[in-house]
Image (spheres, rainbow, N blue to C red):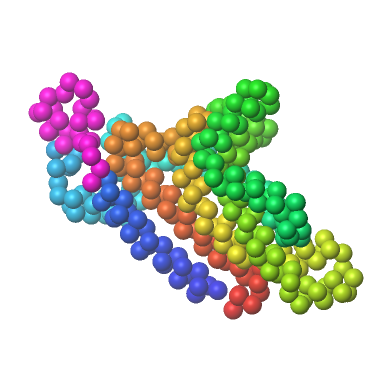
Amino acid sequence: MITYIGGRLAAIAPTLLIVSFVTFSLLELTPGDTAVSIAGEGATEAQIEAIRLALGLDDPFLVRYFDFLTNALQGDLGESLMNSQPVMSAILERLPVTISLVAFVFVISVVLGVPAGALAARHPNSWIDRAISVVSAFALAAPTFLIGLLLIVVVSLEWGLLPATGYSPMGDGLGEWASRLVLPATAVALHPAAELARMTRATMTDTLEKDYIRTARAKGLAEGVVVRKHALKNAAIPVVTALGMQVARVLGGSVIIEQIFAIPGLGSLTIRSVLDRDLSMIMGIVIVAATITVLINLLVDLSYGYFNPKLRK
């Protein structure tokens, strides 16, 4: 197990290297001039050229990339081109907000998706199964931003149940913190919850036909015990895999949702950085997001040993 973990951790480095190179290349191909964005309207050509020289923006592509890579290996992601704030400092300021949102998303996804899928598997081809399929199809088809706007209009403005926008740190009170995250997290969570419901239904339907399930029922075990302790655990690996694959999608969905709900996380920082062509900040955010995704997928792989002890070897 230690060797496996070490090998997976070692694989993170080339993964991040590829991600950084591809991102840097795409930013190079993006239309626009960072020096012009920094100089602002009315700047002379001489002023723009001075900014370009000061920031090294006129250096060849590979020179700038290797400079970034050298500094990143030392833990320095550079400074924002717009306000000279250290990139890592700006990211660490907003990272807890986004992590809170993402954690809420996964909790809601599991709480909604897994029981729904298990219920559909227990009643195949029934009205319950069809209803869950219809709701899952709607959740998969509806854009995240549209769900978010509908939740604001209905739950916040019409019913007045939860705040529409803003974020409150956990230090200001757990209730206030949670109330600010429920709506945005629900908007993002419906899509992964639908994926989990479909995956759970498919794997549970197959598992419930296994011989050991028939044996458990023949021994007189209650149906709930058979489903929870035998079927669900053995069907969990594909479900957990599907959950791990949602990490990048959830992080991407949070970019728009944080804008809609005025949440000061990495998503809103990403939007601002893209509009300002703040290349250093964009690179830092991408590297941090890629690292989080790789680490969570490693945890997903390690969880397989819990659900299937044979895999521990």
Using the image, determine if residue 206 lies above or below residue 34: below
> Looking at the rendering, in which quadrant would you find the N terminus?
bottom right
Q: Is residue 147 magenta?
A: no
Q: Which residues are magenta?
A: 29-52
Q: Is residue 224 left or right of residue 131?
A: right
Residue at the image point whose x is 80% and y is 66% from the top: 226
Q: Is residue 239 left or right of residue 15?
A: right
Residue 210 locus on image (x, y percent)? 73, 74
> Looking at the rendering, in which quadrant would you find the C terminus?
bottom right
Using the image, determine if residue 100 lies above or below residue 197: above
Choose between 54 and 104: the one closer to the eye: 104
Residue that lies at the very extreme toward the top in this rendered image: 42
Residue at the image point whose x is 56% and y is 62% from the top: 241
- Majority SS type along the magenta span: helix
Choose between 298 and 128: the one closer to the eye: 128
Q: Is residue 53 left or right of residue 83?
A: left
Residue at the image point whose x is 17% and y is 42% from the top: 56
Residue 7 locus on image (x, y percent)? 45, 71
Q: Is residue 38 magenta?
A: yes
Residue 79 locus on image (x, y percent)? 30, 39
